[in-house]
Image (cartoon, rainbow, N blue to C red):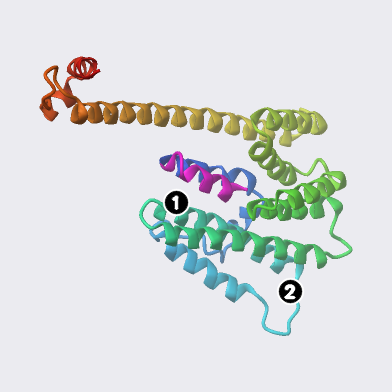
Amino acid sequence: MFMQKIRHATYKHRTVLIVVVVLLAIGLVGSFAVWGAADSPSANTDDLTTMEQIELYESYIAQTLPAEGEEITYDTAGTVAALYMNLYSLYATAYNETVNDDADLADEYYNQSIASAVSAAEYYQLQLDNATENTTDYEKAGVMGNKAMALACSEDNEAAQTVFDEALALAPNNYDLAVNYLSFVYNTEGLEAAQAYAASYMELVGEESSFYSQMQSQIDYIEQYEEMLQQIYQELENLQNENQSTDGANTDGESGTTGDGSAEDNTSSANDTTDNTSADDSAN
């Protein structure tokens, strides 16, 4: 879902791509919880390049997975799934960093981002498969929300919607699930639909719940993001129109003729719009 939006934007507004990646943090709050772990690779990565971070996460995943023949536990499956979602985000960033300079390499990162999301969905399912009798419906719904978001990131929105529906039926008050679904609704149906869902969730939990204000903060962030995105698109469109006007003036200057049919001086005609208009009229 997210990488598809980023990729489509490439052809129209390349410089806005990094802004789109920021939205990933909205829907992946639950998945990113693994970053708080003491042995998480997220610690002290500020000085690392994107590719160095990717290598670190891939190495950590290999170390976290159980040895051959050992069964994976509920907690381990959830940790691995969250790590794969971090990889998804990092590969999206790598795509952003290379798409303007190396399209083939960017495509490779794009495919790796999708593969990471697919792996995340598989491990979230393994987490559900290994749930114990003590695992509550509330907890299961949160995991299902994470799986649905991973499916959406792998561009399988239909499967994501199905899992979201099942999770919402199980525990509609689960906050992590609600945040994931809010992000999904915004990216698939738009701002108004996201606002409507946020309002319905806040009504469900009530003003006394801490989740009420937290959800309000989430929808406020999305509204600010939408406003910022629209401003950027408008600025890019204005810049594009200016460039087209300049290109048009240069083209007219190069092809224009004087009234006696002789070629005009390209430098003066490119810099003088009035002369271009007169030259065009006399040529006609």
Q: Main secondary structure of the magenta part?
A: helix
**In the image shown, does 107 or 85 lie closer to the viewer?**
107
Q: Secondary structure at mark 2?
A: loop
Q: Residues in magenta?
A: 1-14
Q: Secondary structure at mark 1?
A: helix
Residue holding disc 1: 96
- For label 1, count other residues whose C-alpha is less than 10 Å away and answer few (under 14), some (14-19) or many (20+): many
**In the image shown, does 158 or 142 lie closer to the viewer?**
158
Q: Is residue 131 magenta?
A: no
Q: Is residue 8 left or right of residue 49?
A: right
Residue 200 to residue 187: above or below: above
Q: Amino acid at mark 1?
A: Asn
Q: Amino acid at mark 2?
A: Ile
Residue 72 image label = 2
**Residue at image location 52% in from the left, 58% down from the top:** 110
Looking at the image, tell me whether mark 2 or mark 1 is earlier in sequence order. Answer: 2
**In the image shown, does 35 or 91 lie closer to the viewer?**
91
Residue 197 to residue 37: above or below: above
Residue 11 image label = none
